[in-house]
Image (cartoon, helix red, strand yellow):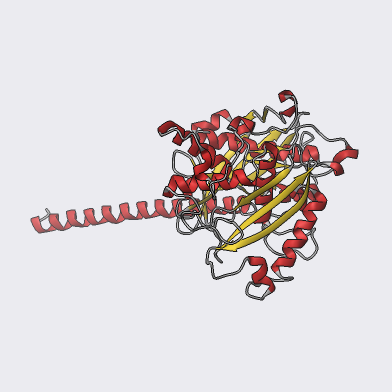
Amino acid sequence: MMTHAQLKQFIAEAILLLIVGAAMVIGSYFISQDNANKRVQNEYHSRFDVVLDSYSYEKVKSKALNDFPEIKGVYIGFNAAGSPEGYVVDLTVKSPEGKDLGILVALDYESTRIVGLSLNNVSGDNAYVIDENNMNQIKDKLIGRQIPLAFLTEEKPDDDDIENITVPGLRDGVYYAQRLYDDRNKYIDYVEMEVQNGMITKIKWDAFCTDRTNKDRSEASLRGAYEISGLDWATQSYNLCHALLECQDPDRLAMKSNGTTDIVDGVTCDIRPFVDLAKECISYSQVGYNKDSYMAGLNMILFHLYQDNAYGLELLNDDGHVVFSFEETPEIYTVYNEQEVAIGFIGVRQIEANITGRVLEENPYENKNRYSNDGQDINAVDYDGSEDGLNSGGNVDDQIISDSIDDIPMSEVASMVEPVPDAYDDTRMVVKACNTCYKFLKEYLNWKV
């Protein structure tokens, strides 16, 4: 018969064994879970590193996926600190002939720009095949662009006309655009473009410094105060502008995803600021928003923020440029969704339209001259967002490039691109995949556009 002391010892040992056993079971479970997670992450890395090299990935679970049977899975990539870096979308889209193209599309988490593309080959006779050379050219066209995408025209060009594609609808005049924030060297890039007879005849790319004691970038580079690899920056800028005059379209400069180009001799610098601003000038030319209108728009933005124009704020340099960075007010030029995630950027023309809508609602201004630099009349062009996707021409029906692309209104299109020569159908298939990603994210993130 057990004594009281022996019974207490027995109970204590039993409880201890129970605790140890439970700890071993729980530990084994967590070890098993950890091993399972490692296996899952290893699989994700093997599949997704080619388009988005993240520290870890997490699969998105959303009812929105039910509306997109072509999407096999959506994943968010995180860095080592646990912050999201981008989306990876695994999908299969069908060609008009019913063939299947498997592809991975990676998008930047903040801007939804395309950061990676990779074919995810579908097996069988029904597979749509894109050869490696065409796919590399398509990547160079699309990586770095914000979705959704559209071609300058949705009509497939004849083979004989592929080399003669030009930018449609340019109106004669002088057009201008500058970045609304400075770079790490305190420079603000700008492009000035002149159009005559529907052709770009003059173009200049330079940058002025927010530090008034510094020279413009071109002059600083010639004096050795601004250095880059290869030729001096002023020469590279000249070579690039000359190349655009020859090809007439920034897309034909073949900018790669890292912002460089291999087709313009002597140019090794990052050409993205030039390409972006040249495209902005082209968009202004297509609606007649000339340099005077642009400068009036800049002054309207300044007046909206600081109740004075560039002249009154002493922001004009000797060349008449507005030397000011809006980096402290990014909400002016950034588009956010309801989760306050940046999904794109807009230019002065659209900012002016937004501000005009608010100002007219609160206190109608009858005279726009208050926003000019010197009090002279500024005959800015009236416009609205419905003009997106229009060319110049007599008949409105002839102006519309396309009412929509992949069931996306043209007013939502963020990037206009050209198809790869001799690979229209292949480019169109990849664009379709990217636009499908946009439609899913629009529903998943509840974007208001």
Q: Residue furthest left?
A: 4
Considering only vertical position in the picture, is 400 above or below 433? above
How many labels sit on residues?
0
Q: Tell me the residue at 49%/53% (across/down).
A: 326
Q: Position of residue 67 (x, y in %)?
A: 56, 28
Q: Residue furthest bottom?
A: 224
Query: In this view of the protein, which residue sits in the foreground, 239 or 11?
Result: 239
Left/right placement of residue 154 relative to residue 365 reads right
Q: Position of residue 269 (x, y in %)?
A: 69, 64
* Quarter occupied by residue 434: top right
Q: Is residue 345 visible?
A: no
Query: In this view of the protein, which residue sits in the foreground, 242 or 216?
Result: 216
Q: Tell me the residue at 21%/57% (across/down).
A: 13
Q: Is residue 352 visible?
A: yes
Q: Tell me the residue at 13%/58% (across/down).
A: 6
Q: Tell me the residue at 8%/55% (across/down).
A: 4
Query: In this view of the protein, which residue sits in the foreground, 196 or 154?
Result: 196
Left/right placement of residue 51 relative to residue 429 reads left
Left/right placement of residue 133 relative to residue 373 reads right
Q: Position of residue 347 (x, y in %)?
A: 58, 45
Q: Residue furthest right?
A: 160
Q: Position of residue 207 (x, y in %)?
A: 62, 61
